Image: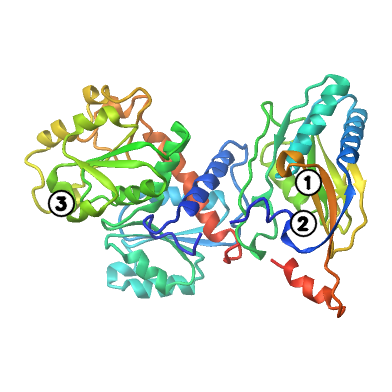
Amino acid sequence: MKGHLLSTEDLSRDDALLVLDTAERMARVAEASVRKLPTLRGRTVVNLFFEDSTRTRTSFEVAAKRLSADVINFSARGSSVSKGESLKDTAQTLEAMGADAVVCRHSASGAPHRLATWVRGSVVNAGDGTHEHPTQALLDAFTMRRRLGRVDGLAVTIVGDVLHSRVARSNVWLLATLGASVTVVAPPTLLPIGVSSWPVEVSYDLDAVLPKTDVVMMLRVQRERMSAAFFPTEREYSRRYGLDVDRAATLPEHALVMHPGPMVRGMEIASRVADSDRSTVVEQVANGVSVRMAVLYLLLGGSGEVS
Amino acid sequence: MASAAASDPASRRPGIARTVLSADDMTRIVSRMAHQILEKTSGGAGVVLLGVPTRGVPLAHRLAQRVQAVEGVDLPVGSLDPTMYRDDLRLRGVRPLEVTEIPDGGVDGRVVILVDDVLYSGRTVRAALDALAAYGRPRTVQLAVLVDRGHRELPIRADYVGKNMPTSRRESVAVRLREIDGADGVLIVSPEPSPTGAAAGAADPGDRP
């Protein structure tokens, strides 16, 4: 893998499969009685989070610690960033502290890309604005492969707030690379203008798509990013685009229900569906640790030269 | 990315290869090692065979088959990837990980026999011992290797040796197994002799990571 993980759009099929295969090995570590590996001893991973995220930050922290890396959590709140320090100055500070990898989440799309030009270590994008969240897409693909045995040829339906979703974008690129066919379903107001250039089908009718779906991925409606009225009422959104019990029953027997979390039960997904056997929500969290261990290993585990 | 070809020294470096063990030799050697294991462990009581990937794994299965044929005992066979415990990870690019598969029943209180194709510096075995500790506490750990080529860098020795093979550090030993390479055999590959006598200087860079 190249020195950074910034997006899935430029991730090659070989590298994506290497991450998934490596994650499979990492998942085995969770079965050992000692779940800690000495692999990244002496390396420092900085979690640089400009946006609140307990689950992603914790997942990266657990992953780095299982590989024996030292972890420093650097959150924007209460740091010099809240005093007006620029991203570049923060980057130079981290550089001076000897960070081998920086895991960055930022509300501005493209921030990790800029960061990557300023630091010597590896940068991992942990979500930038509405752009990408590559490790989430990798763990989603990993979950599909573990449950259904493959990603190639699957029909994946992504439902909801595609406009604001970096998870959707990362998944669209990665799934296309891995050979799945993706359909996005959303109200027209929640689809980005450029969606016609994406490698996806677009539909506004969830009921028509579900019976031909192997994996349905529900997105959270991101109220915090919504400054305008994108749909009339939450109830109407939920009626048309929410996955309730009756809708879930029209899915094929083997189909999976995925959600990147945090879920808004009763809004985009019904409680009974979220807790059903076909839901992978909890598995996705466990798989997230394995995938992030794989990414950190592939970025930091060698001399830094391509083998 | 590193593939099976890259871990096979014979295909990585040009040179003169000579066969030192034939397929028949290997069959006899594996058979003898299986008998030695049975003798030393009183009929294989509590034994678990763990192959070190890649070629240690099929060898472990072959030993188990021979033990089965001789004594009628089914020994559990698994694999143990020591990669993440290596001390030389930073000396070269990222190594791909291999499968670790601990048989049901685990390793606690068992006699674990690590199986590898070639014993050389001993560093792989050291890493494997560390990896094993993550999965439990065996009563005894033993080591079985098809070829011991010398040049140890750590205080490690094998309990079962198929063939002691004195080699020069400049040579490489390539074990071929039909499960992976299509045919059995052990080769020693010497670097191409250079007419100017500069062979050592020319071959050395290939050795470095």
For residue A270, say whether it is visible: yes
Q: Nearer the viewer, residue B130 or A185?
A: A185
Q: Residues within 10 Å of mark 3 (few under 14, many from 20)?
A: few
| Side of A170 where A43 appears, left or right | right
Dot 3 and dot 2 within a common chain: no
Report if the CB atoms under discs 1 and 2 are less than 8 Å apart: yes
Residue topped by disc 1:
B176
Q: Quadrant of the C terminus of chain A?
A: bottom right
Residue topped by disc 3:
A226
Mark in front: 1 vs 3: 1
For residue B157, say whether it is visible: no
Q: Measured from the top left, where is residue B187 in percent x and y?
A: 84, 52
Q: Look at the picture and state if A106 lies above or below A292.
A: below
- Residue type at mark 2: give it: Ala
Q: CA distance from mark 1 to mark 2?
A: 10 Å
The residue positioned 51% from the left and 70% from the top of the image is: A98
Please report, as a chain letter, where disc 3 is located.
A
Q: Measured from the top left, where is residue B149 in percent x and y?
A: 88, 54
- Residue type at mark 3: give it: Met
Kindly state the secondary structure of the residue where label 3 is placed: loop
Dot 1 and dot 3 within a common chain: no
Q: Quadrant of residue A113?
A: bottom left
Residue topped by disc 2:
B10
Q: Residues within 10 Å of mark 1 (few under 14, many from 20)?
A: many
